[in-house]
Amino acid sequence: MSFVKRAVGRMVHRWWPYVREAAAVTPAATGAYRFRSLGEGVCISFPQGAIFGEEWIEIGPHTLVGERVSISAGMGPGVDLGPDSIVRIGGGCSIGRGSHIVGHQSIDIGDDVFTGPYVYITDQNHVYDDPETPIGRQWPRNRPVSIGSGSWIGTGAIILPGTRIGRQSVVAGGAVVRGEFPDHSVIAGVPAKVVRRHSPGLGWHSPSAIARTPLSPPHPAGSPAPMS
């Protein structure tokens, strides 16, 4: 038995790179036609996670989707979600392995966005308005999500409905993010908040640094103050 197991193991390891290459979803693959748009050079690595609602999913050119990433539009396969796309991933992105992108209304990920593994992005959440009805049976609410181009989303971060992240921003690993955040922000914590910003003349700084910075340089002793 050990001989058979070793022989099978060698065969699997020898052929696995070919299997991964053959089973990846690319614009030339059979499964590509199901997507609304797959740009040139896109690769959805094998093994894939749960992928459905492809007709409402767009992925820009030269984006790499890691292994076991789930990308879905809608509650399940076979649902008509209307004329517009739901999940849009820009060009030049890299989506880390094991991540989930679950869209029902609108998820817009800009160009050159990189994520670590096991990131969760969704535009839908359960409600708990009725204290007597099980939460899982209450109708969920959708709010659009937008992640600006050039951003980095750290490992295990959770992006909740209604979140808008500006360009060139960083989300720390494990952050739980909800709300609107400006360009050039570092976002961290549970719940997440801006812990660093980038401003002309100051560079990267804590948000409180602006309040501590004088609006104009001090005047030399005895010199008249400028006229307003």
Image (cartoon, rainbow, N blue to C red):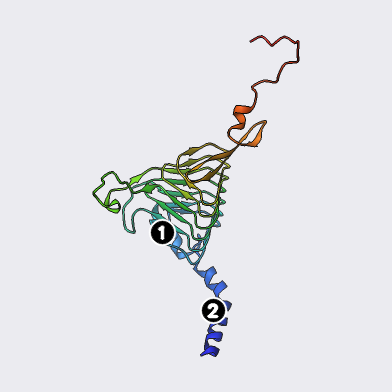
Circle 2 — which element? Answer: helix
What amino acid is at disc 1?
Answer: Arg
Which numbered mark, 1 or 2, is in the foreground of this view?
A: 2
Q: Looking at the picture, does residue 12 appear above or below residue 182?
A: below
Q: Position of residue 213 (x, y in %)?
A: 64, 27
Q: Secondary structure at mark 1?
A: helix
Q: In the picture shown, does residue 105 fall above or below 206?
A: below
Q: Is residue 34 above or below residue 142?
A: below
Image quadrant where residue 144 sits? top left
Q: Quadrant of the C terminus?
A: top right
Q: Which residue is painted at 48% across and 57% down in the image?
A: 99
Disc 2: CA contacts within 10 A as few (<14), some (14-19) or many (>=20): few
Give the residue displayed 72% in from the left and 16% down from the top: 219
Q: Amino acid at mark 2?
A: Val
With 170 as the anchor, is 72 left or right in this view? left
Residue bearing mark 2: 12
Check disc 1: other Cα within 10 Å, few if <14, some if 14-19, many if 20+: some
